[in-house]
Image: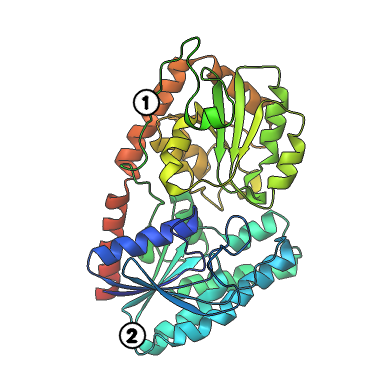
Amino acid sequence: MKILVYSMNFAPELAGIGKYSGEMAEWLHARGHEVRVIASPPFFPQWSVLEGYSAWAYRKTDWNGVTVCRAPTWVPAKPRALGRIGHLLSFTLSSIPLLLAQLRWKPDVVFVVEPPISCAPAALCFAKLLGIRSWLHVQDYEVDAAFGLGWLRGERVRRFALAAERWLMRKFDRVSSISSTMCTKALEKGVDESRLVLFPNWVDVEAIQPVARPPVAEGVPAQGFRAELNIPAGAVVVLYAGSLGSKQGIELLAEAARLLVCSHNIHFVFCGNGPSRASLMDACTRLGNTHFLDLQPAERLNELLGMADIHVLPQRADAADLVMPSKLGGMLASGRAVIVTAHAGTALSEAVWGRGVVVEPGDAAALADAIEQLSMSPETRELLGSAGRRFAEAELDRNAILQRLEEELQRCIAG
């Protein structure tokens, strides 16, 4: 197969959507398929173009056999509502020449990753022009999220945006998303069930494995990240590792840390970058039980996740069924207990139910109480962590998920 991946976020060295797009392209290439990628320069989650890339020039590179064409993209330093729209539109417009440049290559399918949905019209026209298949993969329902989180306002604007989104989604030969709840939402938007595919985020269960805990004894110093952060070897570490953005409801963690500041055995570690990092650090200024790390390289990810005794994953209630945090797979695969904030019945709560703890979003006291209860019960943490690991091995294995995708791509092209 010849597959054109149209994904604004393509950054295999980072986390999130860019990492999944990169691993997918690399895996398909290794299976003998020709893969090309149209993307922006990597900028997420720090909202700054990575060193070695240009925000203002077209670049073409070869990455592990995959041809990657990057389009100039404006990246706002502070991603507020209008800035986000301008950012997405800048990539949408600048990527069109790269899309047209693929006419002679003539791929079998164009695989569009949302966000941004604004690339969908050009991709559909490209597919119709060549008579090839089109596939839309929804990582986030960005239109719903934009209004739900208050980035966009106005009932008329909302109705128009949702109608345009529904029209576009119905035009694709295949539409996929990352959870059963998000697939159900696609059905509600008018996508025919015969064209709908569940394509969840995965985890490399070989690379992410439970880290053996060193024995804790008096006089034995802490190791690894704990030593770097001056955290005692016997302390209970509560870890949040991921993007520090507005969808996460990250401010809840600062409040939970404040409520537990007198529990000297509990330490919070925040690892990541993003627009909410500065405000989070300000909120934790006088809290001696909080520690901050920058985004870590891939080779230290397993060590980082294994440092935790408890993973926390906050999510705002108004985004709970519009996005599925990609970081959850790594948390479960690490074999550590997980606490999420989500309403019952949402995709996030269902993913964690029976292998973690679910508390109501926005309730810092309930989150602090759940953390404190788990901190006092190593046996419960062990049971939940083991259940999460088994789930990751059975349902989130990268090879199994990508093999199913490959089969669906072949069916799509053959059909």
**Residue name at image x 29 percent, y 64 percent:** 28
**Foreground: 197 or 4?**
4
Residue 390 on image: x %, y %:
33, 33
Q: Which residue is mark 1?
A: 212
Residue 149 at least partly seen: yes
What whole-number distance in Å separates the C-alpha atoms at marks 1 and 2? 50 Å
Q: Which residue is mark 2?
A: 106
Residue 14 on image: x %, y %:
49, 55
Seen in the image, is 280 located left or right of residue 15? Answer: right
**Residue name at image x 43 percent, y 30 percent:** 355
37 to 356, vertically: above or below:
below
- State which quadrant residue 38 falls in: bottom left
Secondary-structure class at tag 2? loop
**Residue name at image x 37 percent, y 46 percent:** 203
Give the class, few, some or many, for how many residues have Cα within 10 Å of label 1's Cα (few <14, many ≥20). Answer: few
246 to 253, vertically: above or below:
below
Seen in the image, is 265 located left or right of residue 134? Answer: right
